[in-house]
Image (spheres, coloured by chain):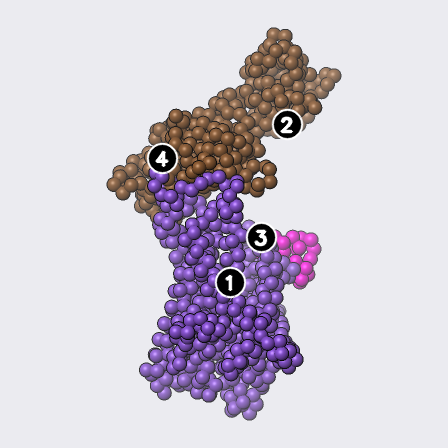
């Protein structure tokens, strides 16, 4: 039994053939933290609102803790689904104190104890008497999380939880939210367009685009082995090259030459494929196989992000990250070697499209 | 997740359910829809009934009126509306600019003071002008000349413009305040002088707000009965009033059809202007900018502002206070006065409460269950908006006379007329109040296990109440000031403050009229606070 199960869910607001969510199927196990990741308009928020019951699916079924909450026959309204939700702007009730907000959904008998427990869990034990407007952004978020967790929901849904926080606080709240969710043993579905949020907090990431699922997997799987061009370029940066699987099966023959690749989807030698090469897998090496001229670069502190043009018969533009201890000037010729761990063959149908 | 509640768990296949699709996937409960529809019907039926009566009237009578009365009335009504609107623009727009953009001394105070004339009902204003400038008035007795013939077209225009220009002033200054000042700075950078920037950048951006203000004034003039009647000028409203008084309801209905057509035309124009206001009021980053220096023109600007204030606020208020003191010294605050006040408070209070309560289902339906149906109901419940009181009264007379005889001539009929006429104010205030409760708050409560009814009680209501109360106070004050419908519908022997002012003033017993008028003015100041914070 899954905490959440979606089967072929369709939601079409406009009824004009481009559904917001298109035949989406998804399973979330108990205690898992799953992130729906995608650009705006990819259907991730709609999926969240369908699970919550704020929107009705046009077809397909949704199960929470094994029982159907939305299918062809029935629709359970949000207040009867036993979910907790953290809204993008927190939606704390401005007319209630922090304690009243946290205890809002609890049964009267356990309200006081539960409120205390939750405020302690989120690290705000002495803030019960304040009003939401007297809290900072990070504190408001903790209260929103405490309020969502207090009634012991089947699942907690978080809609863009970090988008209203500034960069410093964001990193801090990512680990804090993860700690709180794990400590509460909660099942959580989180929606974000920020890959850093997704990679940092999730047990599993679901990448969405155009209302459909593109790839699901652990953060490492998603980043190291993107399955298609969209995932490769949306989650992190990538260089995509076309080529042929080499004879040994763990290299790909490209315009850069023989590229080592540990993730070839077991394609037989000789098949046409594309590879995604992360900038991190191009390492500066005076004896490396790839040589290129720096066309432009910018210094970000942690690294030098440069575009290089390879030498040779068929010049290619590549993005590389150079360690900031080195210096690079436009026009310099640099050599790189390719680390196999961050090279992945991307899905075949994408390959065909690219070649055509 | 129990299934005992049938209303809560409903079929979910929406793709093929036209009812659910009509509501964009969120159909309301039938209970809410039923109440909202009933409220809307009550709001719209009286006026629709008048229109039907008018359209179906004897063609011979139509011809007679079209030949003899309507052309003259059109000319008089439109002439007055155009003149007053132009005057209001000429006074209101420069004042708005002076108060928001220049180094005029005491700008913040002027913003308040120049809104003050709005709380003086034009018929009370007219009375004070008659006292001062009328034949045998204060001027005539002091200087031997009246300076101004209040009973002339000029007199009527000046009086009406004096008490309506704040609409233009407030809308224009609110628009100026919100206007992104980067536009003006961009104009300056592009080499335009302040005067050129004013003409080529600020004024075009201000045009929608000025249009909206002008149309409000025009609507007001078309609907006004008290002031034009006291100043003996005849328009559609007074003509309809006297036709009803002489029991010629069918002529009254015909004239109403023409007047409603005019009003609808203006409303259409106002709607278009409003859409423009929203478009242009892009908020910029707010900075405290250097105001335009008036320099040598400062005394001139001060003289202008002071003169307007003197004639539109100081003069009427001073006259009212003087005559009130005289009246009170002569025992004007007697048993009868308190009786009139009580009548006023009870009818206006009842109307305000009813309007406040009835607005809730209509607005709630529109905001939380958007769709064609709720938009239509919402529009329909605004029918009474800025329609003259005489037409609402005529609708009430028709309906109660034909269908609810046993309530004919009771205070209930009058209260209902107030509700129909002023409900839009309550609708607007409630709409604003509800829009300040973001839907996420309701969704948050729902996700915490609260049914829609409990969400309404625990979250929406506590947050929306202040705004709803503002609406109630608007309706209360408007009903308190209302004159024509009150004159036509009040039960025999039940006079209100407004009615007494009209009767006493028409017999030149100003010391009896003044205390009631002053009381109404003072009470009207209360909602001004909300209005000013809104604009």
Element on which disc 4 rests? loop
Colour purple, chain: B
Q: Are marks 1 and 4 on the same chain?
A: no
Q: Relative to residue B49, is residue A182 drawn left or right?
A: left
The residue under the point 66% across, 80% down is B67
The residue mark sitting in front, 4 or 3, is: 4
Query: Could you tell me which chain the residue with mark 3 belongs to?
Result: B
Q: Relative to residue A3, is residue B103 drawn left or right?
A: right
Distance CA(mark 2)–CA(mark 3) = 38 Å
The residue mark sitting in front, 4 or 2, is: 4
Quadrant in the rendering for residue B354: bottom left
Residue A190 tag number: none
Distance CA(mark 4)–CA(mark 2) = 49 Å
Distance CA(mark 1)–CA(mark 4) = 44 Å
Q: Are marks 2 and 3 on the same chain?
A: no
Query: Could you tell me which chain the residue with mark 1 belongs to?
Result: B
Residue A297 tag number: 2
- The image shows residue B140, relative to residue B109, as above or below, that is below
The residue under the point 37% across, 33% down is A154
């Amino acid at each position: 039994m899954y905490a959440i199960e979606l089967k072929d869910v369709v939601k079409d607001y406009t009824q004009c053939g481009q559904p917001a969510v298109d035949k989406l199927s998804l399973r979330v196990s108990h205690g898992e933290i799953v992130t729906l990741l995608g650009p705006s308009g990819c259907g991730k928020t709609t999926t969240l609102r369908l699970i919550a019951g704020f929107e009705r699916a046009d077809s397909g079924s949704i199960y929470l803790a094994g029982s159907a909450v939305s299918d062809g026959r029935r629709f359970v309204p949000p207040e009867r689904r036993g979910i907790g939700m953290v809204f993008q702007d927190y939606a704390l009730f401005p007319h209630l104190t922090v304690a009243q907000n946290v205890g809002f959904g609890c049964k009267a008998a356990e309200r006081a104890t539960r409120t205390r427990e939750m405020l302690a869990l989120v690290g705000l034990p002495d803030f019960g008497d304040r009003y939401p407007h007297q809290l900072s952004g990070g504190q408001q978020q903790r209260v929103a999380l405490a309020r969502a967790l207090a009634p012991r929901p089947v699942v907690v849904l978080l809609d863009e939880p970090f988008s209203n926080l500034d960069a410093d606080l964001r990193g801090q709240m990512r680990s804090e939210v993860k700690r709180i969710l794990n400590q509460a043993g909660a099942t959580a579905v989180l929606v974000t367009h920020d890959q850093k949020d997704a990679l940092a907090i999730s047990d599993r990431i679901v990448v969405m685009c155009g209302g459909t699922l593109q790839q699901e997997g652990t953060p490492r799987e998603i980043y190291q082995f993107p399955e298609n061009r969209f995932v490769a370029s949306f989650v992190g940066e990538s260089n995509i090259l076309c080529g042929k699987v080499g004879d040994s099966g763990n290299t790909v023959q490209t315009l850069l030459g023989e590229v080592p690749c540990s993730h070839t989807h077991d394609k037989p030698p000789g098949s046409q494929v594309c590879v995604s090469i992360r900038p991190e897998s191009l390492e500066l090496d005076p004896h490396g196989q790839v040589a290129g001229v720096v066309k432009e670069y910018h210094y970000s502190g942690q690294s030098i992000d440069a575009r290089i043009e390879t030498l040779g018969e068929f010049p290619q533009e590549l993005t590389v990250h150079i360690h900031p201890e080195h210096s690079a000037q436009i026009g310099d010729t640099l050599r790189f070697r390719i680390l196999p761990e961050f090279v992945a063959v991307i899905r075949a149908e994408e390959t065909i499209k690219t070649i055509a | 997740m129990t299934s005992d509640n049938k209303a809560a768990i409903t079929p979910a296949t929406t793709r093929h359910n036209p009812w659910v699709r009509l509501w964009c996937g969120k159909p309301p409960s039938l209970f809410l829809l039923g109440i909202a529809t009933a409220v809307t019907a009550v709001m719209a039926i009286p006026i629709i009934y008048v229109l039907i009566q008018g359209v179906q009237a004897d063609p011979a009578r139509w011809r007679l009126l079209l030949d003899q009365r309507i052309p003259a009335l059109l000319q008089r009504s439109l002439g007055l509306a155009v003149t007053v609107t132009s005057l209001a623009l000429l006074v209101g727009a420069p004042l708005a600019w002076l108060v928001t953009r220049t180094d005029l001394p005491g700008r913040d105070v002027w913003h308040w003071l120049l809104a003050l004339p709005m709380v003086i009902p034009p018929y009370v204003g007219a009375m004070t002008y008659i006292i001062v400038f009328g034949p045998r008035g204060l001027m005539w007795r002091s200087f031997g000349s009246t300076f101004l013939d209040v009973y002339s077209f000029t007199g009527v225009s000046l009086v009406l413009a004096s008490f309506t220009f704040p609409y233009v002033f407030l809308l224009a200054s609110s628009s100026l305040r919100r206007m992104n000042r980067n536009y003006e700075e961009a104009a300056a950078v592009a080499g335009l002088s302040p005067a050129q920037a004013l003409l080529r950048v600020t004024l075009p951006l201000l045009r929608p707000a000025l249009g909206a203000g002008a149309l409000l004034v025009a609507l007001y003039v078309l609907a006004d009965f008290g002031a034009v009647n006291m100043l003996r000028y005849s328009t559609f409203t007074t003509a309809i009033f006297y036709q009803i008084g002489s029991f010629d309801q069918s002529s009254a209905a015909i004239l109403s059809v023409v007047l409603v057509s005019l009003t609808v035309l203006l409303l259409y124009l106002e709607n278009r202007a409003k859409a423009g206001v929203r478009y242009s009021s892009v908020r910029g980053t707010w900075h405290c900018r250097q105001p335009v220096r008036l320099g040598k023109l400062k005394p001139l600007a001060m003289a202008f502002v002071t003169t307007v204030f003197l004639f539109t606020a100081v003069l009427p208020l001073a006259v009212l206070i003087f005559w009130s003191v005289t009246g009170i010294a002569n025992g004007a605050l007697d048993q009868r006065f308190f009786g009139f006040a009580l009548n006023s408070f009870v009818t206006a209070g009842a109307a305000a409460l009813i309007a406040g309560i009835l607005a809730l289902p209509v607005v709630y339906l529109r905001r939380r269950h958007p769709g064609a149906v709720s938009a239509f109901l919402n529009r329909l419940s605004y029918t009474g908006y800025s329609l003259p009181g005489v037409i609402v009264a005529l609708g009430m007379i028709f309906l109660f006379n034909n269908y609810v005889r046993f309530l004919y001539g009771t205070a209930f009929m009058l209260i209902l007329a107030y509700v129909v006429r002023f409900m839009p104010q309550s609708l607007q205030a409630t709409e604003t109040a509800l829009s300040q409760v973001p839907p996420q708050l309701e969704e948050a409560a729902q996700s915490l296990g609260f049914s829609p009814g409990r969400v309404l009680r625990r979250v929406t209501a506590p947050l929306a109440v202040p705004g709803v109360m503002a609406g109630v106070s608007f309706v209360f004050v408007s009903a308190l000031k209302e004159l024509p419908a009150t004159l036509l519908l009040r039960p025999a022997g039940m006079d209100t403050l407004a009615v007494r002012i009209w009767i006493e003033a028409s017999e030149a017993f100003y010391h009896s009229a003044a205390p009631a008028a002053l009381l109404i003015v003072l009470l009207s100041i209360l909602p001004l606070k909300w209005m000013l914070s809104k604009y």
